[in-house]
Image (spheres, helix red, strand yellow):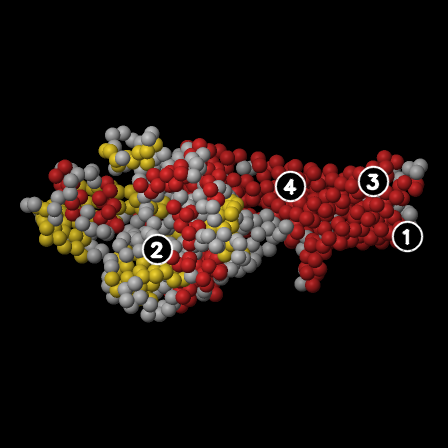
Amino acid sequence: MTKDMKTTTLCYHCGETCEDTLISIQDKHFCCQGCKTVYEILNKVELCDYYAISQNPGLSRKTIIRPDKFAFLDDEQLKAKLIGYADTTQSHVTFYLPQMHCSSCIWLLEHLARLDKAILRSQVNFLKKEVLVVFDPAHTSLRKVTELLASIGYEPHFSLHSMSGKKIKTYDKSRIYKIGITGFCFGNIMMLSFPEYFSLGSAEDKGLLKLFSYMNLLLSLPVFFYGASGFFSSAWKSIRQRSLNIDAPIALAVLITFVRSVYEILSGSGAGYLDSMTGIVFFMLIGRFFQDKTYNTLSFNRDYTSYFPLSVTLVTEQGQERSIPVSNLEKGMRIKVRNGEIIPADCILFYGKARIDYSFVSGEALPVERSVGEIIYAGGRQSGSALEMEVVKEVSQSYLTQLWNNDAFQRKEEKGTSYIHTISRYFTLVLFTVAAITAAYWYVKDVSRLWNAVTSILIVACPCALLLSATFTNGNMLRVLQKFGFYARNAGVIEQISGIDTVVFDKTGTITQQGHTTIQYEGGMLSTEAQQLIRSLASQSAHPLSKAVLQVLPVSPLLPVKEFKEQPGFGTEGRIGDHRVAIGSAAYMQMEKKTRETGSSVYIKIGGNIAGKFVVSTAYRKGLPGLLTRLKKQYLLSLLSGDNDSEREKLKDLFNAQLLFDQSPQDKLEYILRLQEQGYKVMMVGDGLNDAGALQQSNTGIAVCDDINNFSPACDVIMKASAFSYFDLLLKYCKRNRIIINTSFVISILYNITGLYFAVQGQLQPVIAAILMPVSSVSIVLFTTGMSSFFAIPLKTAGRKNKTDNGKLI
């Protein structure tokens, strides 16, 4: 039943306010028929526990999905690319569901079989927002499964990228196997070495000691040949390139330790240092696990295919409509694009009123209007009624595709070399120098002790503590940064950020809040009658500024408008009763601007007199003024925008830096390049396709996203928009990286000096090496973890404050 709203009521399904009408079933109220329908579907199969797990877990269903929206999934060629596995009894398909957000979602999606018996099972990957559905193709189809998901509020997201066969690279599981095997061997070797430690080499049962030594040797083989293989491979590659990375001295230490231990055990002259060798490898592997950790639930290498739709509606010569894959579009085809859909190729408009949102592509803040006969470029999103267009260039030849495929826009694999490798070269040089001096000394003094002394130096002075300090610092920092919405591609990005001295911002969508505007009225007091007249005229126009004005005027009955005229992009006018009313730009009113305006102005004329104007400005992200003030103290700032300069004065006060407007994607890239040629280390902060080239060219590219699972251009860091207000603290935290690493390196040097004291004398016993190795490693791990957590305290404070202030605009 339906009744007028008396009080504010929240929808039982999605939690939104029921504004106009209240639809009820017993004591449960819904904001629209869509939400009510979802409840009825779940209630019919007794799945209403969905609402018990989380309060109002669903999403609004006010937007009705047209019946033929997923007809393209009947295409056999397309189905073959989407279905991962198929036989006569079952088909496997993985859907990406950006709506997934809570435990109720997981519960419902893993009970799809109760909604359709042809679905055999479903499994959710919450981090990736994916669900694997296994269904019986004899009783249902890919299209029907998709329509079922859409009917309960989980419409799958399909893009051209879905057909490309490119998958996000998952983590290499062999690293886990290496850590597990090496850890098992290390632990058992330590246990079997206890008799040697406690007796200091003089145990009475020599037979048992020898057995334990051979068992240790056997356990060390998988560590040496499998666990340490990555270090040997990396060291060999660096030697072939006539350079030394940090893996070279580590590989040398492992090799010398293993060879000397094998010699001592087989010759019966000692128990060797296999516990130290396996310990080195074990701790190094754990460190590498943290250092090379990436977020396989995110993609840092997205291209335009992730943004384009999978299908498009084709209009045949007979006027019939059918869905075809976007990749099958050809020049001359007639297509239909509906409200909210993306233009998939460069087209000529044949029918309809085009209002294209290019904010993600060009940076223009307001939708662009196009008339019949004009070219509409790919990548924009239609806002308004359906359009019919003729394709003039295929997807692969469109302006957007050509722009993306420009060599300058392709990712450079490496943007810098870790300074850890530089330190390791000096470390290796010093190590070899000490070994050479020791060898010369014992060659003259007592040649019988030369071998023990030199090999002991190479064993005890392994730079593992240096690598551990870097890997555990970076690994813990990655974890902390992730917690605060800052997702770095890898640990190397943290080092890159520490060297940045220039930050360049994009405007639209980066420092501005998408979908939000501020509207101020300037002029004489508007009477209730005047407001009603303005509202009646503004309701006749579909221009974004007219809609913005309409939103701030109080609700009142709309009056009939006669003699209506509209000059697209400039203004409208008409007669309402006895009043002649016009709204529009200064040029439309034939008046000169007396001052530079800080936004888009909509002037009001009633009865031939200017009553005032509405100034529509972009809403900037929360905390922007304070953020820029803090950043200016440490960095050179710039602003690049594809939008016009209507807000130059306001931005000038905020930035007090170089501001460039009407910038094309190529202009942005070239600006970054010019800064780099002048010696600056540049960070680019953007959000859209028009920033892709600049993000690639910069030393560090950061993409700001309101939803990290939605499309963002290729970058080094994906940052949640909610973290923008404390962006400076995130950068400051990254700069602490070198302080922690350098301090921990000094600590490790102290341990090395202690070990070298015994090594140069040729008196390094296995028990001493066994004590120094784990103690130094554990000390470094505790220090780096503790300090990286300590430096995160300001971030935690800012994060808590941000949550309390969430949603505030300036």
3 or 1: tag closer to the N-terminus: 3
Q: Can the viewer see residue 451?
A: yes
Front residue of 98 and 548? 98
Marks 4, 2: nearer the viewer: 2
- Determine whether the residue tagged by mark 3 lies in a helix, strand or loop: loop
Residue at x-position 28% and y-position 56%: 386
- Residue positioned most to the left: 578
Q: Amino acid at mark 3?
A: Ser
Q: Which mark is residue 68?
A: 2
Which of the two marks, 3 or 4, is nearer to us in this view? 3
Mark 1 or mark 4, earlier in chain: 1
Q: Earlier in the sequence, mark 3 or mark 2?
A: 2
> Between disc 3 and disc 4, whose residue precedes?
3
Q: Which residue is mark 4?
A: 743
- Measuring from the top left, give residue 553's x and y in whole percent: 21, 40
In space, the residues marked 3 and 2 are separated at their CA atoms by 72 Å
Q: Element type at marker 1?
A: helix
Q: Residue at x 14, y 37 (%)?
A: 528
Residue type for callout 2: Asp
Give the spatial CA distance, label 3 vs label 4. Answer: 33 Å
Q: Residue at x 35, y 41 (%)?
A: 37
Q: Please, what secondary structure does the residue beneath circle 2 have?
A: loop
- The residue carrying mark 1 is 447
Q: Which mark is residue 193?
A: 3
